[in-house]
Image: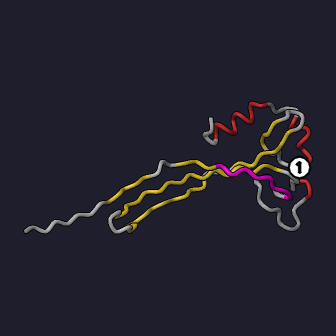
Amino acid sequence: MGLSTGLDAEVFADVPKLDIAVSQVSNVTKDCKNAPAGTSLDHIFHNLTHVVPTLSYDVGFNATDVNTEVFQLGNNTTLPTSCLDFLPSASALGPVPDSSSDGQRLGSQVSMVWVALAFMVLGLI
């Protein structure tokens, strides 16, 4: 008479995924950070778009016979963020000017090329 033992196991690895959070921020500096007290009004922006990409993945090993997760490893990495300004004269998002009073002048010089460039930097195109 022989004794037989066995264990069914499962190894998994999720495909890395890129998540992008886009939010409107107000009363911030050109890098989308809250403006500290005493910041010159020329350096406070009342409405910018903040783009935050995150790369995440999961890998692990489960023992399915005993319904036990042996280990799981996951990681979320925030990639470089972008802060964009809406430029009315170009009807597009583009780079944030050095001061909030420069926005109208800069907008006349910007086209959709800036939007394409921003998305290429983020790896979306």
Q: Residue at x 72, y 50 (%)?
A: 22
> Magenta region: which residues?
20-27
Q: Nearer the viewer, residue 50 or 44?
A: 50
Amino acid type, mark 1: Ser
Residue 65 locus on image (x, y percent): 32, 65
Q: Residue at x 87, y 56 (%)?
A: 44
Q: Is residue 24 magenta?
A: yes
Horizontal arrangement in the rendering, residue 120 relative to residue 95 (left or right): left
Q: Residues within 10 Å of mark 1 (few under 14, many from 20)?
A: some
Residue 110 picture quarter = top right
The answer to whether residue 117 is above or below residue 28 is above
Q: Nearer the viewer, residue 44 or 16?
A: 16
The answer to whether residue 47 is above or below residue 8 is above
Q: Which residue has dot 1 on it?
A: 100
Dot 1 falls on a residue whose secondary structure is helix
Q: Residue at x 77, y 31 (%)?
A: 112
Say which quadrant the N terminus sits in: bottom left
Q: Is residue 111 magenta?
A: no
- Magenta span main SS: strand
Residue 78 locus on image (x, y percent): 60, 55
Q: Nearer the viewer, residue 81 or 106?
A: 81
